[in-house]
Image (spheres, rainbow, N blue to C red):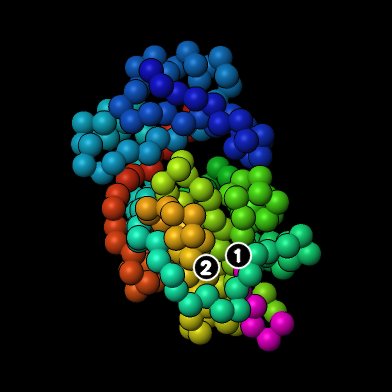
Amino acid sequence: MKIKKLKWDSDFFGFGIAKLSPGAVDGMQEYVRRNKIRLISSLVETNKTKNISRLERSGFEFVDLRLTFSIKPHVAEAETTRLAREEDILDLKKIARKAFARESRFNHINIEKGKVEKLYESWVEKSVEGNFDDLCFIAEERGEVAGFATYKRVGSASSSIGLIAVTSGFQGRGIGSKLISACSNLAYKERRKILTVSTEGKNITAQNFYIKNGFVIIKIESWYYKWVK
């Protein structure tokens, strides 16, 4: 059995949340009872049909797909972007609040909507501080914060984009592409071999955006949830 309580998630949402390794269903009941778990999540590759069947027989329900894209880091045009600073956090939280809650896999009947919004506010704030993702790039237009992208180093050879968003008033102007370029430039400078980004299966707009910017799909996984009564 491989199940682990997610401390940060549990503290944030106010109830016990655990993540279960794909297929590791046997024996989880005692761990769940002992650690007062209310929500168990499992992320499994879509071609692992035996693991999916075991989850479904154990009462897990499909929530959404998770698509992971990648590009090889390269030097690209990233003008009007810079690293976010503490004084940018308020603007960034406003952008995050509007950009992610609707498409989030956390958008579930048993989770308060306000909590989901605060999750992404906290994500971008901690990334500016270097406490979640490692840093955050912002794009400015006419003196306003038009969008942002968070960047995280993963091991010694890869990096990932955690969140990326552009405000509604500045969409369609190539700002999102510039933010990707800023992340790619840093990954290239750091000699990373790969830059990845993930999005939910229902977020078709994001998928098309990444493909337009040269990303290719490298992994498709399914999120399964089980709520413990």
Residue 123 located left or right of residue 178 = right
Q: Nearer the viewer, residue 116 or 161?
A: 161
Amino acid type, callout 1: Phe
- Residue 83: image x %, image y %? 65, 64
Q: Quadrant of residue 10?
A: top right
Q: Nearer the viewer, residue 144 or 121?
A: 144
Determine the main secondary structure of the stretch shown in magenta. Answer: strand
Q: Which residues are magenta?
A: 138-143
Name which residue lies at 40% across and 61% down: 73
Number of numbered callouts drawn: 2
Q: Quadrant of the N terminus?
A: top left
Neighbourhood count class around disc 2 (C-alpha, 10 Å): few under 14, some 14–19, many 20 upward: many
Quick one: SS at disc 1? strand
Name which residue lies at 48% across and 65% down: 185
Q: Nearer the viewer, residue 206 or 143?
A: 143
Name which residue lies at 28% across and 53% down: 218
Residue 90 seen in this snapshot: no
| Magenta span includes 142 | yes
Label number found at residue 137: 1
Question: Circle 2 sits on which residue?
Answer: 182
Q: Earlier in the sequence, mark 2 or mark 1?
A: 1
Q: Is residue 198 above or below residue 35?
A: below
Q: Cβ–Cβ below 8 Å for labels 2 and 1? A: yes
Q: Is residue 114 above or below residue 223?
A: below
Amino acid type, callout 2: Ala
- Residue 91: image x %, image y %? 72, 68
